Image (cartoon, rainbow, N blue to C red):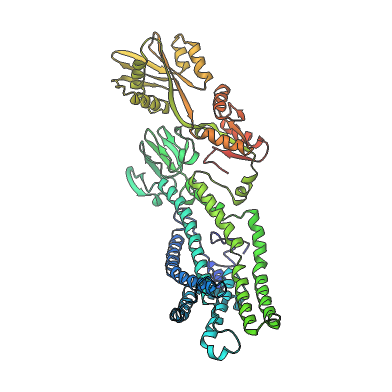
């Protein structure tokens, strides 16, 4: 074995070994006696399917804990009532002593409860205790097992030999309730912990499984065949129709389209794709049919790697956990030594100042108390559980944390770097202004929307949406044609209309109202010119509007003394206008995609990057 990394929170171990020297079966033979076993993960498994067997085991374990909790809670309630009654009656005198009939009843009932609690629900702790005695390996289960067993055996002894021991110790004092309450509450804690882990992990897997395509159409032997996604091989040709998900990562062999990659990248505006471009599995083909050659399958796809990264982050250890590991390694033996020392001191010294029966009673109670209360679950389990839940909840909101160390460093962040589109802004363009120069505003919107209705460009869809909101009736368009990179044209009622950018208007040698255009661009808006071959009929402004919670989010950062920086590929004037609306401290505009990562590295201080990919932490 070359290396091993264990995380008790996720109950997983990563082992690097030489299969020629040792096998998984041989390793299991060695560690099985300590209550653990290794489950080998095969390379062809996907991140979604590889842990299905483990998940079923955990669900069964959760159901078992649930049954134990439902059984133990009434027992705990009875034990607490009896304890409270006895304490309130004799030492405090708050109420009369329990009637003798009830006292006798509970005197026989509590041993039955304690026996079931210790040997059925508490069986793992008994096994942990015996492993400690046999192999000298202790953990939290060992402490609980020794403590509760000591309380039970003491109580059983004084109950079974009550008459013989009455002259030596107080046989009326027993600790069945300690066994019941301790095991009951620890079982409840384990149930809540396991449910929290499964809830977080299950929610993440449910979200990503919903994104994953179950079947796909494949071109084989000249025919289109629908197959299960797990049966697709590398170099298979996928047939992807408009509106369908692209099943797996690949490269476009034929066709052109725009692809919605928001599930992966966080950018809501579709990306134009042509032959030779790479596409990501589970993204959506918005328009046009595609033929895609599969390049990645199984655990090597982008979606599977994201899921694996989240699980790796959940299993990674923060610096504070390494400290907890070092303490826990010596904590259990020290606690056991302290418990024994406390017991012996009460017997030897306590008996000098009080009757032996009282000293023995306090010694047993102190011994059990030290073992149970000092269980290192807070160090060994609370921190990993907090990381698992924290990373999982972040993933549900589209925030992927690379490691537990990164999560711990979040507290020291003083600079947050935002991308503009889809992070500060909605990423969905909207019509903000309609300025008609030769016709009415309503007529301009009707004509323009009739043309744009034949296009699937995001700007076109926004215009049609605006017309629908105004209940404008769309007209019949003939001879529609898209003008690549410039706009579009079509005939309505025997008149040819054009809609496009400033480049198209200049090529048509039409006069542009620079005041209107300047007003749009200074406000960070994109102008669209609507015209015939002879004159400009009006202008429409489009803008990517600010998210409703963007201002509040930036204000919250400022309240914590954090600087907000925005990066964008837009022109400086547009970027500054948006930054002023939101309250961004610093703007870096007109960047190429590759330049943004460099600017992030330049950002001073401890920084958090938001809006690139799926919001990486």
Instruction: Determine the residue located farthest toward the bottom in the rendered image.
Output: 164
> Which residue is found at the position 63% from the left and 46% from the top?
411
Whether residue 15 can be seen here: no
Q: Position of residue 6 (x, y in %)?
A: 59, 61
**In this rendering, would 177 be left or right of 226?**
right
- Report the label total: 0
Whether residue 584 can be seen here: yes
Quarter containing the N terminus: bottom right
**In this rendering, would 229 be left or right of 492?**
right
The one nearer the camera, 85 or 47, is 85
* Residue 93 occupies quadrant: bottom right
Q: Position of residue 528 (x, y in %)?
A: 44, 19
Quick check: 196 above or below 151? above
Quarter containing the C terminus: top right
Quick check: 534 above or below 402? above
> Which residue is found at the position 42% from the left and 49% from the top?
209
The one nearer the camera, 197 or 570, is 197
The one nearer the camera, 58 or 478, is 58
**In this rendering, would 448 be left or right of 429?**
left
**In this rendering, would 51 be left or right of 593?**
left
Q: Position of residue 205 (x, y in %)?
A: 45, 51
Q: Where is residue 246 in the image (x, y as percent from the top left)?
A: 41, 41
């Amino acid at each position: 074995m070359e290396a091993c990394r264990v995380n008790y929170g996720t109950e997983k171990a990563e082992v690097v070994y030489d299969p020629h020297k040792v096998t998984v079966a041989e390793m299991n033979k060695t560690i099985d006696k300590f209550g653990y076993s290794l489950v080998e993960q095969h390379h062809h498994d996907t991140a979604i399917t590889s842990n299905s067997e483990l998940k079923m085991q955990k669900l069964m374990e959760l159901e078992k804990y649930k049954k134990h909790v439902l059984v133990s809670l009434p027992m705990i309630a009875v034990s607490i009532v009896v304890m409270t009654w006895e304490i309130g009656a004799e030492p405090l005198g708050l109420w009369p002593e329990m009637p003798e009939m009830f006292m006798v009843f509970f005197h026989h009932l509590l041993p039955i409860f304690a026996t079931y609690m210790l040997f059925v629900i508490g069986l793992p702790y008994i096994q942990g205790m015996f492993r400690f005695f046999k192999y000298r390996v202790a953990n939290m289960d060992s402490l609980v097992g020794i403590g509760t067993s000591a309380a039970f055996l003491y109580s059983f002894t004084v109950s079974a030999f009550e008459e013989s021991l009455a002259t030596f110790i107080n046989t009326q004092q027993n600790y069945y309730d300690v066994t019941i309450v301790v095991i009951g509450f620890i079982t409840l804690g384990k149930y809540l912990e396991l449910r929290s882990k499964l809830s977080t992990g299950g929610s993440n897997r449910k979200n990503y499984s919903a994104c994953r395509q179950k079947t796909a159409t494949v071109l084989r032997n000249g025919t289109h065949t629908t197959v299960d996604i797990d049966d697709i091989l590398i170099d298979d040709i996928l047939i992807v129709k408009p509106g369908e998900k692209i099943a797996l990562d690949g490269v476009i062999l034929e066709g052109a389209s725009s692809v919605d990659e928001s599930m992966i990248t966080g950018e809501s505006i579709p990306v134009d794709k042509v032959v030779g471009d790479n596409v990501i599995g589970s993204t959506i083909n918005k328009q046009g049919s595609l033929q895609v050659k599969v390049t990645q399958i199984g655990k090597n796809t982008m979606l599977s790697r994201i899921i694996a990264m989240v699980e790796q982050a959940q299993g990674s250890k923060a610096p504070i956990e390494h400290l907890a590991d070092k303490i826990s390694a010596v904590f259990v033996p020290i606690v056991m030594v302290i418990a024994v020392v406390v017991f012996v001191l009460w017997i030897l010294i306590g008996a000098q100042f009080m009757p032996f029966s009282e000293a023995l009673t306090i010694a047993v109670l102190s011994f059990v108390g030290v073992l149970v209360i000092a269980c290192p679950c807070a160090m060994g389990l609370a921190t990993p559980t907090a990381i698992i839940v924290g990373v999982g909840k972040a993933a549900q909101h589209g925030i992927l944390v690379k490691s537990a160390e990164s999560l711990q460093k979040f507290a020291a962040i003083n600079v947050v770097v935002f991308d503009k589109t889809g992070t500060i802004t909605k990423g969905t363009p909207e019509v903000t202004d309609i300025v008609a120069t030769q016709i009415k505003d309503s007529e301009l919107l009707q004509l323009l929307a009739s043309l744009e209705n034949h296009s699937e460009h995001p700007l076109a869809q926004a215009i049609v949406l605006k017309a629908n909101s105004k209940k404008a009736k769309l007209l019949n368009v003939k001879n529609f044609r898209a003008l690549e990179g410039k706009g579009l044209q079509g005939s309505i009622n025997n008149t040819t209309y054009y809609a496009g950018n400033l480049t198209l208007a200049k090529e048509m040698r039409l006069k542009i109202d620079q005041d209107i255009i300047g007003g749009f661009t200074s406000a960070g808006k994109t102008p669209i010119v609507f015209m015939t071959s002879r004159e400009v009929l009006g202008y429409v402004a489009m803008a990517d509007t600010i998210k409703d919670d963007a201002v509040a989010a930036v204000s919250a950062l400022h309240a914590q003394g954090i600087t907000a920086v925005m990066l964008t590929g837009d022109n400086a004037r547009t970027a500054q206008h948006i930054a002023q609306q939101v309250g961004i401290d610093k703007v870096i505009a007109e960047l190429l995609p590759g330049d943004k990562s460099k600017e992030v590295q330049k950002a001073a201080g401890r920084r958090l990057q938001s809006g690139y990919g799926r919001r990486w932490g």
